[in-house]
Image (cartoon, rainbow, N blue to C red):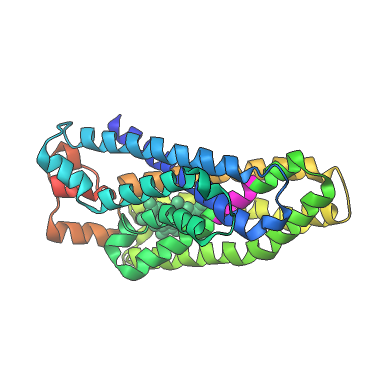
Amino acid sequence: MLDALAAAARALTYAGILTAAGAVFAQASLWQSVPANDPSRRHVRNGALLVIGAVLGGTFVLIFRLGGQFNEPILSAVFASGTGAALLFQLAGAALLLAPAAADDATSPIRLSNAALLTGSLAINGHAASAGLLPGILAFIHVSAAAWWVGSLLLLRAACRDSDPAAVADLVKRFSGLALKVIAALATAGLILLLALVDVAHSPWLTTYGQVIAMKLVLVAVVLALASYNRWRLSPRLYEGDRAAVPELRRMVDRELVVIGAILAVTAILTTFTAPESSEEQLSRVDRPTGAACQCVGTDYAERAAG
Ligand code: HEM
């Protein structure tokens, strides 16, 4: 039960981070076409609130997974660790994005760095961080690109609802110009990260980690197929002024967001319950914990410290 709650809190943290940071990145890069009522402010606020709620909930769940005592060893294992540093980045990034002054300038470097605190939080804790600096940087690029994608889809969805077809076509043109590069960066960083984490010489697809990542890759193929349909079939109709293409685009964006939600849930399972072979080996060499609190070898490195 606590394990399931931990994975759920992590999936919600991912959703909040990608929504809040993604809205900032998308707003900054697609700004000229953003509708007058600026839906990205709402996305930033909702995403930041979700991050705060999910992170606090996840921290309590972690403390209970470690035995539920608020004593010094447990608290220092949680807070004086990579988990604690990521927590600080997430709470600070979300709080700064919620500050009223932060919403004024879409392209302000301060606002962009506040959003980067959120995506960076996933690069300083977890499998990538424990594998070294380069995997950490790759994780940052991977998550930031994923955030841009989610933020842009949310912006497109709002435009389909509120804007006229010409404005939607204009936004889609800007989005398409960037999407190919950003999604290529997302996939390339993800694949190199995977190669850095798993030992390809030792049948990684036979491990639980390999099987969960295979599930993720199937979902990624589905979302890429939906995105390709939008780009090659739907967008030309929008550019030609076909009004019926607008509600269809909105439905397709909804489907893409649902599949991305499933990708985040699978990623949360991957990072909560499994570990690439190399980290398991590292763990068994260093300090594999024993006892009920540490049966899984996920990214809760606080568990190892407390074990
Ligand atoms: C070619 C496609 C992709 C590959 C190969 C890939 C691979 C990976 C790998 C290897 C990790 C590190 C997992 C770990 O720490 O053990 C990761 C993390 C992550 N991925 Fe992907 N991924 C892909 C697509 C996506 C997509 C489309 C999204 C969402 C839109 C996404 C969201 C994330 C998130 C949020 C994390 C952060 C995990 C963390 O450090 O806590 N990925 N991905």
Q: Residue at x 52, y 38 (%)?
A: 46
In front: 204, or 50? 50
What span is colored magenta in the figure? 148-154
In front: 198, or 161? 161
Q: Where does residue 247 sit, x and y in percent of width and height? A: 78, 40
On screen, residue 299 versus residue 148, left or right, reads left
Specify the quarter for ligand 1.
bottom left
In front: 230, or 182? 182
Can residue 218 be spotted in the picture? no
Q: Where does residue 216 sit, x and y in percent of width and height? A: 48, 51
**Number of on-image labels:** 0
Q: Residue at x 53, y 66 (%)?
A: 185
Q: Where does residue 35 sit, x and y in percent of width and height? A: 73, 47
Q: Is residue 153 magenta?
A: yes
In front: 39, or 184? 39
Q: Residue at x 42, y 42 (%)?
A: 13
Q: Where does residue 64 sit, x and y in percent of width and height? A: 22, 32
Name, please, the residue furthest toward the front: 101
Q: What kind of secondary structure does the magenta stretch mostly adopt?
A: helix
